[in-house]
Image: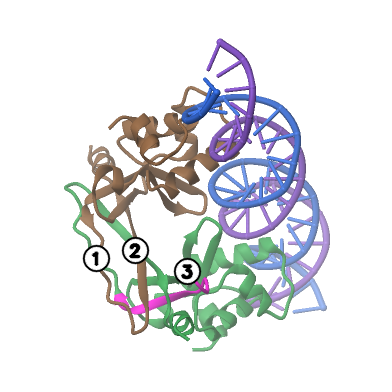
Chain colours: A green, B brown, C purple, D blue
Amino acid sequence: MRVVDILNSHNLKRTSCREGIINVIITANQALSENEIRERLAGNYDRTTFYRSFKTLEEHRIIHKIVVDTQMVKYALDNTVTHKDEHAHFFCNECNTVKCLENIPVEKYKLPDGYFDVETEVLIKGICANCKNQGSN
Amino acid sequence: MRVVDILNSHNLKRTSCREGIINVIITANQALSENEIRERLAGNYDRTTFYRSFKTLEEHRIIHKIVVDTQMVKYALDNTVTHKDEHAHFFCNECNTVKCLENIPVEKYKLPDGYFDVETEVLIKGICANCKNQGSN
DNA sequence: GCTTCAGTTGCAACCATGATGCAAATATAA
DNA sequence: TTATATTTGCATCATGGTTGCAACTGAAGC
């Protein structure tokens, strides 16, 4: 599916910022932060434009946000695009990258009486395969 | 265990800010934000002092931080104090409260080859029992 | 109780993320 | 090409996190 079609199917205008963001995220093999996306983007956009583009794309479930910490937010292509269920995320303490563990569905936790869950976020922090290998060299 | 003993056992000086924070968190039945703690506290402390107190108490595993979003951070008494294992957290979309689900241990997710986990954060968002009851009245 | 000093506090200043109002610019449909 | 609903850029603000530094203070020793 082309980026144009993704935007069209959500009745979103195709602006260079939106197209750029989606392109960068689709190409990347990992979740990216606002700055990481900006670096990989041709155009130079205002922070607010970026912020609002992310928000719009998120609301339309084209991308999803992973909050690692209050000072580290990353974005990845959403489930509805890759057709995967709710999945866990992995954050590497060494290289600070975030990966969607698309084959690791989040467990359905049994809540106390009267509690109802809407969504569950699972963030696993540790060392990724890449950094583990470098560490043992 | 008294607050004084908690600080002493970690070789931390007993300052009114630290004692106050721990007291407020122990008393509360839920995780609290910086502002919620400040409101319940007698003294008037600088933001930086608060921030550094939280950091110190967190590093010594007396309290732990729950990041709901980039703009919402809450603190709760840590496992080492209540002697509970790694647990899930519940965030109510209605009343914005965070509760430690101390009887809900986090699942040990099986990671891809080469990946090693250090800690897993599980944040379940939904409606708490309290808000659910009010909604059905 | 007084002295000493490592540790803590308050202040100023800075960065990142999130958010809104408003005028100018633009995508798209007519 | 024009009209209009959206989007963009700019200014501005809020919150959380962070550091440097001088002033202050808890706790130990005298």
Residue in the picture at 21% in, 55% down = B104
Task: Give x and y (percent) for residue B64.
Answer: 39, 48
- Mark 3: few/some/many CA within 10 Å (<14, 14-19, 20+): some
Q: Secondary structure at mark 3?
A: loop
Q: Which residues are magenta?
A: A93-104
- The answer to whether tags 1 and 2 share a subunit is yes
**Badge nearest the viewer, 3 or 2:** 3
- Mark 1, residues whose alpha carbon is within 10 Å: few (<14), some, or many (≥20)? some
B35 within the magenta span: no
Tell me how far mark 1 sits from mark 2, CA to CA: 9 Å
Quote the CA–CA distance across marks 3 and 2: 12 Å
Label 2 element class: strand
Between A23 and A111, the one lying in front of the other is A111
The disc label shown at residue A93, or none: 3
* Three-letter code for the amino acid on which mark 1 is drawn: Glu
Q: Is residue A100 magenta?
A: yes
Q: Amino acid at mark 2?
A: Thr
> In the rendering, at what x and y percent does residue C29 appear?
61, 76
Q: Is residue B1 left or right of residue A1?
A: left
* Residue at (46, 47) in percent of width and height: B73
Q: Which mark is residue A37?
A: none
Give the residue number, with chain letter if any, for mark 1. B107
Q: Which mark is residue B120?
A: 2
